[in-house]
Image (tube, rainbow, N blue to C red):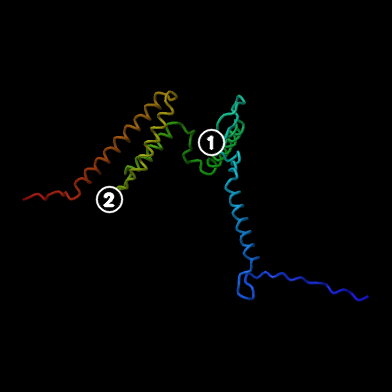
């Protein structure tokens, strides 16, 4: 029995017929596609907004010590946690052990050199005092132009002021007197230099007149 030849059906997808006219089927297809696009656009506009994840909301909450939910302000989540008391004690002990070994090594290598004692509060004040003085031009060699760093000196003076405020009531009379004297001298020297700069700026072209014979 001879096999039946497969039948192939061709669908005419052309929008314009062989006579040059627009086919009605093409017009109907375009109209259906336009209506479908309008329907999808209307459905997208009427969809409810999606709520952001809870982790991204600015009004996040956390539990306080009592277990109650407390608001977490912006920026608090990024603050790193401090070390525990055990970690602090261990690092302090390891640091002391290392510095002790270093001092013993230096004494063995150079027994005639001056040995550093324990650091005290007055060493901190003196170090910051000298830093501010260098910023105000002190320590300049003879014949050299003073190198003044007013902003750096001001920052160091302000840091000493913060130190005075934060250590109030915890210093010995000698420590409080040392800090107060250092701040007084630095502030007076700062004012003297800034006043001199202001005078020179107000009279830029003033020069000393030569004396007549």
Q: Is mark 2 on a helix, strand or loop?
A: loop
Badge 1 local density, few (<14 within 10 Å), some, or many (20+)?
few
Residue 181 lies, in percent from the top left, at 34, 30
Q: In this view, does 196 lie to the left or right of 56?
A: left
Q: In which quarter of the image is residue 168?
A: top left
Real-space Cα separation, disc 1 to disc 2, in angstroms: 54 Å
Mark toward the start of the polypeptide (1 vs 2)? 1
- Which residue is at a point 78% across and 72% down the rendered structure image? 8
66, above or below 139, in the image? above
Please name whichever residue, 168 or 71, is drawn nearer the observer in this view of the structure: 71
Q: Quadrant of residue 157?
A: top left
Q: Name the residue carrying label 2.
A: 143
Q: Name the residue carrying label 1.
A: 76
Q: Quadrant of residue 5?
A: bottom right
How many labels, in total? Answer: 2
Mark 1–mark 2 contact, CB under 8 Å?
no
Residue 131 lies, in percent from the top left, at 38, 41
Marker disc for residue 127: none
Please name whichever residue, 32 or 56, is drawn nearer the observer in this view of the structure: 32
Please name whichever residue, 191 or 89, is drawn nearer the observer in this view of the structure: 191
Q: Nearer the viewer, mark 1 or mark 2?
A: 1
Residue 140 lies, in percent from the top left, at 32, 46
Q: Is mark 1 on a helix, strand or loop?
A: loop
Single out the residue that lies furthest toward the right.
1
- Which residue is at a point 58% across and 41% down the rendered structure image? 56
Residue 102 lies, in percent from the top left, at 55, 40
Quadrant of the frame with the N terminus = bottom right
- Which residue is at a point 32% across and 45% down the rendered structure image? 148
Q: In this view, does 115 lie to the left or right of 138?
A: right
Please name whichever residue, 202 or 101, is drawn nearer the observer in this view of the structure: 202
Single out the residue that lies furthest toward the left.
213
């Amino acid at each position: 029995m001879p096999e039946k030849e497969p039948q192939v059906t061709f669908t005419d997808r052309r929008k314009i017929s062989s006579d040059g006219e627009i086919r009605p089927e093409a017009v109907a297809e375009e109209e259906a596609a336009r209506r479908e696009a309008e329907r999808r656009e209307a459905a997208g506009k009427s969809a409810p907004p999606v709520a952001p994840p809870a982790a991204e909301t600015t009004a996040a909450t956390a539990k306080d010590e009592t277990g109650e939910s407390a608001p977490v302000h912006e920026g608090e989540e990024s603050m790193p946690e401090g070390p525990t008391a055990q970690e602090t004690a261990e690092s302090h002990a390891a640091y002391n052990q290392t510095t002790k070994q270093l001092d013993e090594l230096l004494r063995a290598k150079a027994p005639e050199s001056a040995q550093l004692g324990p650091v005290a509060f007055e060493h901190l004040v003196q170090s910051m005092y000298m830093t501010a003085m260098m910023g105000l031009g002190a320590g300049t060699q003879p014949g050299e132009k003073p190198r003044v760093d007013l902003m750096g000196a001001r920052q160091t003076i302000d840091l000493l002021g913060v130190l005075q405020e934060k250590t109030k009531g915890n210093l010995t009379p000698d420590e409080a007197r040392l800090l107060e004297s250092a701040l007084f001298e630095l502030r007076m020297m700062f004012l003297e230099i800034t006043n001199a700069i202001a005078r020179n700026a107000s009279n830029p072209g003033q020069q000393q007149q030569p004396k007549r014979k």
